[in-house]
Amino acid sequence: MVAGHVAVWKNAPFIRFLLPLMTGILLQWHLQFAVHFAWYTVGFSVVILFLSFFLSQFRRFQLSSVSGIAVTGIFLAVGSLLAWYKDMRHDPDWLGRHYKPTDFVTAVLKEPLVEKENSYKVFAAATSIAESKQEIRVRGRIVIYFKKDATLSSLDFGSQIIFRNTLQRITNAGNPGGFDYERYCLFQDVTHQVYLKPGEFVVLKEKKSTIFEKILFPIRRKILSILRRYIRSEREQGLAEALLIGYKDDLDKNLVQSYTNTGVVHVIAISGLHLGLIYWLLVQMFRPFNHKRVLKWFVPLIIISSLWLFSLIAGGQPSVLRSAVMFTCIVLAKSFSRKTSIYNSLAFSAFLLLCINPYWLWDVGFQLSYAALLSIVIFMRPIYNWFYIKNKALDLIWKLSAVSISAQLLTTPFSIYHFHQFPNYFVLTNIVAVPLSSAIVLGELFLCGFSVIPSVATISGKILTWLIWVMNSYIERIESLPYSLWDGMQINITQAALLIVVVIGFAHWLMGKQKNGVWVGAIGSFFFVSLRSISFYRSEQQHKFIVYNIPKHRAIDVINGRDYFFISDSDLLVDDFVRSFYLKPSRVLNRVHSSRQLLNSLWQGNFLQFGTKRILLVDHDLEIESCSSKISIDVLVISKTPKLHLLQLSKTFNIRQVVFDGSVSPRKIKYWINDCALLRIPYHNVNEKGAFVIKLN
């Protein structure tokens, strides 16, 4: 087994480059080094390598470790440089460096408008800002929300608009455990957003678009129109669009959740599965030309071009770009009649993608796809060899099961870390969903190819609609089974890394019969269980009061140990999506469960009393009774729009902190902030500062 590992290391040299490159990217993002340190490291390492060439061969061998350190230093520095220069905030022409609220902004729409519930959303590139007669060229992407209006029909990708509405910096909601939306946008060079109504912008006559946009968007639009014409059911139509070209704006949210809960959401994302099908189709189509020398280089060129064209039409997502790079390597290797190491191909594709965009290292799809492929390469064959089945149909089912089981081994730590859940019946769903989704993708390609024949397209559309309905129904049926989902799992990045160590250790023992693998797995398990036990103990001892930042809503959690009581608006109680997005991450992070008993034990009228902490919640007009001495209030939470005068309230209560929740109007907050300033009372506005969290012990 050790010899095999050495062989893998030697046959996959890009692993040696990839690891320091990733380390450099991570160090730069978290520590924010000055860029000149990375350049000094490159220069110093290059000098060492250059000087080593003047040494004798024996002396060079003796100092080989120094050369290795120098090479590692170069790729560490390269990773750091990639992360630094990719950060839009370091660009001297970045929009945020020059913009003032009084400026006019010129922006180019970079995609067709996407319809939302109350608006249209589009990503745009800011090209210039102007105040009076001075114009400054800028760079940076923004999100524009247009109020729905009939006049927007003239807007499309390439349209240029000018507006003066104030750009708002994109920030996080600031809720515990919440999604880091600000970082997500920054990784796409998006830092600002604006909401525009009719009359608040001017559309210029000239359009600006690249040749690729002029080709790809019409093709993408044509494919969508074909799918929408022949696949009539909305749920099936939305899934068909996502399966073929990765268009997810029409996907049913509940259906996506079902696919996520059953462990097959990967079939929706454009990935190696889809590109592999297209690669297989192209290989079959050009098989008759394989023996013709005239077409020796023409066929690979057509195959590679087709793969990359599909990748760009599908939106250029990391998963599909990774697959395109990998299949390009395979096609070129076959053209040169050389076999490449799969580990080297994976390392090379990851290296190349991170050079293109180092921030893909944080992309969940990027992480899961590489973990799944690596896991399949390592574990699939040993798992498949557990059983020998003569029947070909049963053997095929077992092979699909082996692929699903092997892929799950290394992806499980990543899935639990990001999604806090584990699909218990993933084998059952993958056995059906993977081959069925493959057949559907092939059917959609057939539909688009023969859409010029209406009768054939109509029949194909009906068959595809039925197949997608079968797959959706099966997934939802599996989801409804008892214990289909192990939910609410919370692990930190250290525990996720320990889980990977456990998997690798025991796999090393089972596959290679190496006893040291048992020790690695056992030690990893010990530390994992120890950290989990400590985290559960801390959860039992926690006492918190959390006011969440949910726009136009009141949302408060009172946490006592692993129990919580929720105080909210009535409409928030029936909005599962909002509660799942804003509140569930915090409850998973704190490992708490709902308990109505806290209401009676801690809450009395408008007051929450826990130990020495006293909290007053005001959400309606409050009648204040005079008393001989002031009552101490640790936190005053103002909700909705009560008639409240803090100056008058301060005569009865000694208020130490004021909190405005998400349901309070900005106009009222400005009025109360003035009172806080006069009374010298600190205040916390969740709309600006994120959730308010106070420990009650």
Image (tube, rainbow, N blue to C red):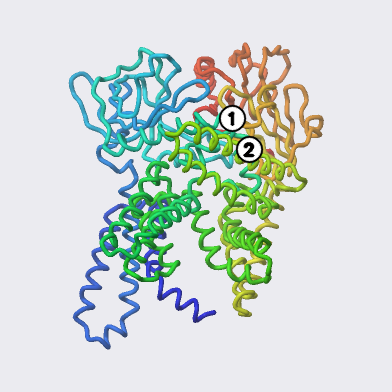
| x and y, in percent, of residue 382 in the image | 61, 71
Q: Does the rendering let one see residue 693?
A: no
The part of the image, by quadrant, that contains residue 114 is top left
Q: Residue at x 47, y 42 (%)?
A: 446
Q: Distance between the residues labelled 1 and 2?
A: 9 Å
The answer to the question of whether label 1 and label 2 lie on touching residues, with beta carbons closer than 8 A, is yes
| x and y, in percent, of residue 176 in the image | 58, 40
The part of the image, by quadrant, that contains residue 574 is top right
Q: Which of 2 and 386 is in front in this view?
A: 386
Q: Which of marks 1 and 2 is nearer the N terminus?
A: 1
Q: Does the rendering let one see residue 70?
A: yes
Q: Is residue 363 above or below residue 189?
A: below
Q: Which residue is drawn at 38% across and 54% down?
A: 353
Task: Report which residue position mark 1 lands on.
Answer: 233
Q: Residue at x 18, y 20 (%)?
A: 133
In which quadrant of the rendered image does the C terminus lie? top right
Left-right relation of 248 to 83: right
Instruction: Please rate how many residues cluster around mark 1, counting C-alpha atoms within 10 Å: few if below 14, some from 14 to 19, many from 20.
Output: few
Tell me the kind of residue under disc 1: Ser
Instruction: Please rate how many residues cluster around mark 2, counting C-alpha atoms within 10 Å: few if below 14, some from 14 to 19, many from 20.
Output: some
Q: What element carries label 1?
A: loop
Task: Report which residue position mark 2 lands on.
Answer: 469
| x and y, in percent, of residue 431 in the image | 64, 54
Q: Nearer the viewer, residue 684 or 382?
A: 382
| x and y, in percent, of residue 662 in the image | 57, 24
